[in-house]
Amino acid sequence: DFTMAQTSSESFSVLMSNTVDVSGLQFAISDDPDYYSFDSVSNTDRLDGFMTSGSDQNGDFTIVSFSLSGDVVSPGDGAIMNISMNIV
């Protein structure tokens, strides 16, 4: 399960609750109407060793995260990344 927690007017944390190992993830966040543009994403300790990137296309943020070395996110709860955005 994923949830988001707004941490300021221009950032939020993505939290994940998983009961099995997770080897990668991809998801989209819709911004409708289009008030924000994607700025950056940074991993928390839960995604240590993962490559994470994001983009903004037509008001949707697309986020992809995976490990080139086979790392996994162990079962647990908590923040996995922080996303920054710009107000347009």
Image: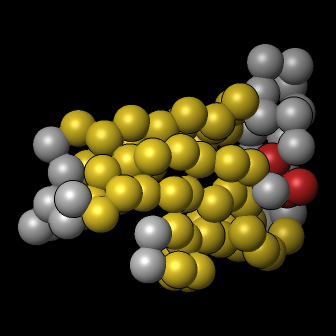
The answer to whether residue 30 is seen in the rendering is: no
Between 20 and 9, the one lying in front of the other is 9
Q: Is residue 52 above or below residue 35?
A: above
Q: Is residue 16 left or right of residue 1?
A: right
In the rendered image, residue 17, in percent from the top left (x then y), is placed at: 71, 72
Residue, x 59% and y 47% (percent of image)? Answer: 41
The answer to whether residue 47 is seen in the rendering is: yes
Residue, x 68% and y 48% (percent of image)? Answer: 42
Figure disc tally: 0
Residue, x 19% and y 51% (percent of image)? Answer: 59
In the rendered image, residue 13, in percent from the top left (x then y), is placed at: 61, 70
Q: Which residue in the rendered view is the most extreme toward the left?
A: 33
Residue, x 77% and y 27% (percent of image)? Answer: 67
Q: Is residue 18 above or below residue 73?
A: below
Between 31 and 66, the one lying in front of the other is 31
Q: Which residue in the rendered view is the most extreme toward the top?
A: 68
Q: Is residue 84 left or right of residue 36?
A: right
Quarter of the rendering occupied by the N terminus: bottom right
* Colour pattern: secondary structure
Between 44 and 16, the one lying in front of the other is 44
Q: Quadrant of residue 56?
A: top left
In the rendered image, residue 50, in percent from the top left (x then y), is placed at: 78, 34
Quarter of the rendering occupied by the C terminus: bottom left
